[in-house]
Amino acid sequence: MARQLLIEIASDVICPWCYIGKRRLEKALASLKDEVEVHIEWLPFQLNPDMPAEGVVRADYRRAKFGSVEKGRALDARVAAEGAGEGIAFAFDRMERTPNTVAAHQLIDLAQTQDRASPLASGKAGAVVDALFRAYFEEARDIGDPAILKEIAERLGVTGWPQATDKARVMQQEERVRELGISGVPTFIFDRKSGMSGAYPPDMLAQAIRQAVQP
């Protein structure tokens, strides 16, 4: 009989390693499908909590963060190579803005709330996270744009957007994440007892999950 496990994932939708980590976790879980029954909860984390609401020009952001556009491009190339191995076609060369992600986290939270209310029809939150990653990293879209968030919500059946969102709850959740000492993402928390931070290979994630479900 498969053992049950809660995996909470602290993540930001503009973090490329979080996208890679999600893909690697999916591979790990596929290898454990007969051993572990997993429930996933997404926890908000902003890489740039002081980001202006309208976001910033990505080239300016990368220059300020890494000292030069060239250094940022070199780091992008490394990430792109890692992503290619997970089937992700990063479109760094077409990305124009670095967005504020508070609204995106509110959309994930709303989808997750609806998943909890209708367990038999769950899966919206994971689909929303994937859509946000794909829109930003592979389609080079500005996921801080309300129109794009509305489009994703409607396509994936997340009702009540944006009226039913709860920004205060999302900010409180992020505060609790930081109080746990989490300062980097992705971070995977297993049954609120153990965890690991980083986009580890699938076999290492699978090993950690096996250890987490041991009695």
Image (tube, rainbow, N blue to C red):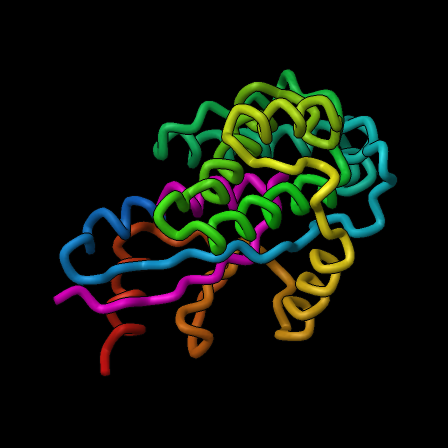
Label total for image: 0
Vertical side of 55 occupied by 33: above or below? below
Instruction: Please tell me which residue is depicted at 53% across the width and 23% down the height of the picture.
Output: 138
Q: Quadrant of residue 51?
A: top right
Instruction: Please tell me which residue is depicted at 27% across the width and 52% down the height of the picture.
Output: 29
Give the quadrant of the N terminus.
bottom left
Instruction: Please tell me which residue is depicted at 65% across the width and 63% down the height of the picture.
Output: 183
Nearest to the observer: residue 174 or residue 110: 110
Q: Quadrant of residue 98?
A: top right
Kindly give the residue lying farthest to the bottom in the view shown: 215
- Residue 166 x, y percent position in the rendering: 73, 52
Nearest to the observer: residue 131 or residue 122: 122
Instruction: Please tell me which residue is depicted at 65% across the width and 38% down the height of the picture.
Output: 160
Q: Is residue 4 magenta?
A: yes
- Residue 7 x, y percent position in the rendering: 41, 62
Left or right placement of residue 158 versus residue 53 in this view: left
- Residue 156 x, y percent position in the rendering: 50, 30
Bounds of the magenta segment? 1-24
Give the quadrant of the C terminus.
bottom left
Vertical side of 117 occupied by 53: above or below? above
Left or right placement of residue 153 versus residue 197 in this view: right
Nearest to the observer: residue 211 or residue 149: 149
Q: Is residue 44 magenta?
A: no
Kindly give the residue lying farthest to the top in the view shown: 94
Left or right placement of residue 151 versus residue 130 in this view: right
